[in-house]
């Protein structure tokens, strides 16, 4: 068999697999949205949930999910990026580095329920905080940190060594080379890692059940910041959208529990898609900023 024929066959197989994956994703999204049709109703998106009557909303759960996303990314991204920079640029090859990588790989394989029980022991019981939003954010940080560290490390290592040498040869310091050359070049892969981490935040339920709780208080923006009624208080229970969906499907007693769960799932998938699009757009803007814009000069 000729090489061109083999190449054509395998190209067709890979295209078929890619089309199948895309079609499966489109089918899943369409099925979820069709079952939760009507999710865009403002009364549903911003209304308060009801434990006994039909027609409840998901306002507090939606806010908790977005707030959990922001807090967790503020904690995990600097830690993951810093760890990736250390492993790629500063750590010396040897037993210590191998041990660190072994610990990262071990942490990456931990089930979320185990991390949730660890969070229950440390962030809920040992600290005396109880079920809190910050406890849930720290638990998800433990889940996201290994994968985010490896993505950042690989992204920095994939930058051509000649680019680094050119920057150092022009008189830039090691820190300037890292901040102004290496990280901007590795930004697309780092953004991919952040998107994967955000997906874990949006979709996690097991770890949050044991750390951030199954309820949320009636939020009041005019309350004192130290009060558990204030939306921005990190030390209050915070039922996220995924936990709300799980609770509706497992122990929901409202007459339209299945419909609310379906609408909540549709909102969740739309949130993930929007975050992916916005993150990619920001990545493109940052790349253009660091690369320098090309301006066309008009001839007079």
Image (cartoon, rainbow, N blue to C red):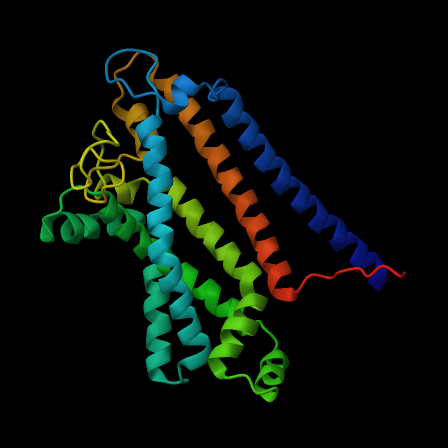
248 and 16: which is toward the camera: 248
Query: At which x and y percent is residue 277?
Result: 56, 43
Q: Quadrant of the C terminus?
A: bottom right
Report if residue 133 is visible in the image.
yes
- Residue 164 occupies quadrant: bottom right
Query: At which x and y percent is residue 67?
Result: 34, 41
Query: At which x and y percent is residue 9?
Result: 78, 53
293 and 265: which is toward the camera: 293
Q: Is residue 263 above or below residue 157?
A: above
149 and 282: which is toward the camera: 282
Could you tell me which residue is drawn at 47 percent across and 65 percent down? Answer: 152
Q: Quadrant of the N terminus?
A: bottom right
Report if residue 1 is visible in the image.
no
Query: At which x and y percent is residue 54?
Result: 32, 11
Residue furthest to the front in view is: 300
Could you tell me which residue is drawn at 58 percent across and 58 percent down? Answer: 286
Question: Would you say 269 lies left or right of 171 here?
Answer: left
Q: Is residue 24 above or below residue 113?
A: above
Instruction: Report the number of discs.
Output: 0
18 and 285: which is toward the camera: 285
Question: Would you say 117 lies left or right of 152 here?
Answer: left
Could you tell me which residue is drawn at 49 percent across and 20 percent down? Answer: 35
């Amino acid at each position: 068999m000729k090489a061109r024929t083999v190449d054509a066959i395998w190209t067709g197989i890979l295209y078929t697999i890619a089309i199948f994956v895309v079609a499966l994703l489109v089918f899943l999204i369409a099925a979820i949205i069709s079952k939760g049709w009507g999710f865009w109703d403002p009364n549903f998106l911003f209304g308060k949930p009801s434990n006994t009557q039909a027609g409840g909303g998901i306002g507090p759960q939606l806010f908790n999910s977005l707030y959990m996303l922001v807090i967790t990314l503020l904690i995990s991204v600097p830690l993951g990026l810093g760890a990736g920079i250390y492993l790629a640029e500063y750590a010396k090859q040897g037993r210590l580095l191998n041990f660190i990588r072994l610990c990262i790989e071990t942490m990456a394989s931990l089930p979320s329920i185990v991390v949730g029980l660890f969070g229950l022991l440390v962030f809920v019981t040992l600290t005396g905080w109880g079920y809190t939003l910050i406890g849930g954010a720290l638990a998800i940080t433990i889940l996201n940190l290994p994968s985010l560290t490896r993505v950042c490390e690989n992204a920095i290592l994939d930058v051509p060594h000649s680019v680094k040498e050119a920057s150092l040869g022009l008189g830039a310091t090691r820190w300037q080379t890292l901040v102004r050359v290496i990280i901007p070049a590795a930004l697309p892969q780092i953004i991919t890692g952040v998107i994967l981490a955000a997906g874990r935040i949006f979709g996690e339920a097991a770890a949050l059940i044991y750390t951030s709780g199954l309820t949320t208080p009636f939020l009041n923006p005019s309350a004192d910041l130290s009060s558990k009624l204030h939306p921005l208080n990190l030390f209050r229970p915070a039922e996220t959208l995924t936990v709300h969906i799980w609770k509706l499907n497992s122990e929901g007693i409202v007459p339209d529990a299945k419909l609310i769960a379906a609408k909540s799932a549709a909102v969740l998938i739309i949130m993930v898609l929007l975050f992916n699009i916005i993150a990619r757009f920001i990545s493109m803007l940052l790349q253009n900023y660091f690369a320098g814009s090309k301006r066309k000069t008009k001839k007079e």
